[in-house]
């Protein structure tokens, strides 16, 4: 029978661990940034996460709206960074409902 050498991880324990001095230099970082720019990589914008926690349970409401009204609501909420629930609450508070 043909004996093949099997891949093992037995030598991993003898590999040296990286030390703090192994941190990339500013030259290496700059080279990596240039390479990333050439290949089209872009920095990912951090998502803004709302830290406002509701103190009460929530419920779901489904509403049928004309398409143009739904588009206006969606655009308004996106432009002003509101959720649909937040803007409804603001409008209800303005009307003292």
Image: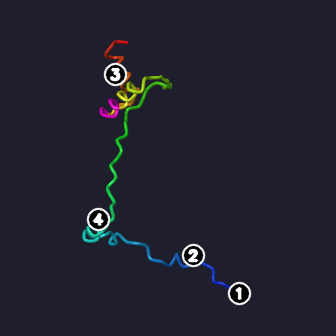
* Majority SS type along the magenta span: helix
Q: Residues within 10 Å of mark 3 (few under 14, many from 20)?
A: few
- Quadrant for residue 4, please give it: bottom right
Is 92 one of the magenta-colored residues? no
Q: Residue at x 38, y 22 (%)?
A: 88
Which of the labelled discs sits on residue 90, or is there none?
3
Q: From the viewer's perspective, is the residue at label 4 or at label 2 nearer?
A: 4
Q: CA distance from mark 2 to mark 1?
A: 22 Å
Which element type, helix, strand or loop, lies under badge 3?
A: helix
Which element type, helix, strand or loop, lies under badge 4?
A: helix
Residue with the mark numbered 2: 9
Q: Residue at x 44, y 26 (%)?
A: 55
Q: Earlier in the sequence, mark 2 or mark 1?
A: 1
- Quadrant for residue 74, please give it: top left
Q: Earlier in the sequence, mark 2 or mark 3?
A: 2
Residue with the mark numbered 1: 2
- Which range is magenta? 75-80
Q: Residue at x 36, y 25 (%)?
A: 87
């Amino acid at each position: 029978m043909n004996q093949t050498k099997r891949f093992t991880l037995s030598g991993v324990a003898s590999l040296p661990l990286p030390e703090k001095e192994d941190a990339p230099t500013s030259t290496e970082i700059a080279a990596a940034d240039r390479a990333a720019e050439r290949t089209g990589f872009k920095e990912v914008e951090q998502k803004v996460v709302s830290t406002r926690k509701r103190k009460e349970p929530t419920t779901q409401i489904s509403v049928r709206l004309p398409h143009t009204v739904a588009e206006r609501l969606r655009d308004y909420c996106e432009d002003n960074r509101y959720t649909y629930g937040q803007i409804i609450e603001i409008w209800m508070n303005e009307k003292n409902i």
